[in-house]
Image: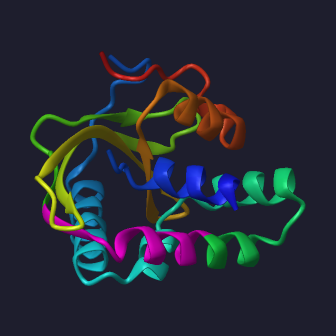
Amino acid sequence: MYFFKRLTLAFFALGFSAISAVALDDADRANLDQSLAAYRTALETADFASVVAAIPPGVIDLISAQANLSPETIRKSVTAQMTTIMASATIESFVMDTDTMTDGTTPSDVAYAFLPTTTNLSIDEGPIQTVQTLTLAVDIDDTWYLMRIEQPQHYDFFRAAYPEFVEIPLPE
């Protein structure tokens, strides 16, 4: 249970210069914007199954292998944990800043973007807390997936699932 709580918090922050600097083209940017809007809507409407579906599949597969559980069990567990944790939280605002994102492509031509992300939320009607993280957006098979990067270890975990990112540093 503790594993899933930590995992859930890693995906949703409670208090979500590159080697290949090719910028996203207009079509990639439009698809990314559409994915970000869908994610924001899912978060605002507490559709946590959709929030969890946005996690890169390789990350889910790696967690599944480490936990010796099926990917579906991992998705259901993380969704249940998010539902429980977020039951006492109110999201005041949620912004993934596309204006200051760092984007590019990996040497194997996988498009990505690091988006500065600010979440303002209150827990149990307490004071509003501001959480600033990065969100890594990655285009896998023409679908944009999102992963919150709260600590360098989260990106290391992502890199274990997607080794083509080993040479792509976190933005400064």
Give the residue at x 64% y 37%.
Answer: 157
Color style of the picture: rainbow
Report whether residue 149 is seen.
yes
| Camera-side residue of 53 and 88 | 88
Task: Point out the stretch of residues depicted in magenta.
Answer: 78-92
Q: x, y percentage for residue 164?
A: 63, 33
Q: Splitting the image into 4 quarters, where does residue 58 fall?
A: bottom right
* Vertical order, 105 against 57 (above or below): above
Query: What is the quadrant of the C terminus in the image?
Result: top left
Q: x, y percentage for residue 48?
A: 43, 78
Q: x, y percentage for residue 90?
A: 20, 69
- Magenta highlight: main SS: helix
Give the residue at x 51% y 44%.
Answer: 110
Report whether residue 58 is seen.
no
Q: x, y percentage for residue 163?
A: 68, 33
Q: Splitting the image into 4 quarters, where does residue 146 fall?
A: bottom left
* Vertical order, 47 against 148 (above or below): below
Residue furthest right as drawn: 68
Give the residue at x 46% y 30%.
Answer: 151
Left or right: 105 with respect to 93?
right
Total marks placed:
0
* Vertical order, 115 against 106 (above or below): below
Left or right: 166 with respect to 132?
right
Q: Is residue 82 magenta?
A: yes
Q: Is residue 97 magenta?
A: no
| Camera-side residue of 13 and 146 | 13
| Camera-side residue of 131 and 23 | 131
Give the residue at x 31% y 72%.
Answer: 88
Q: Splitting the image into 4 quarters, where does residue 32 fall?
A: bottom left
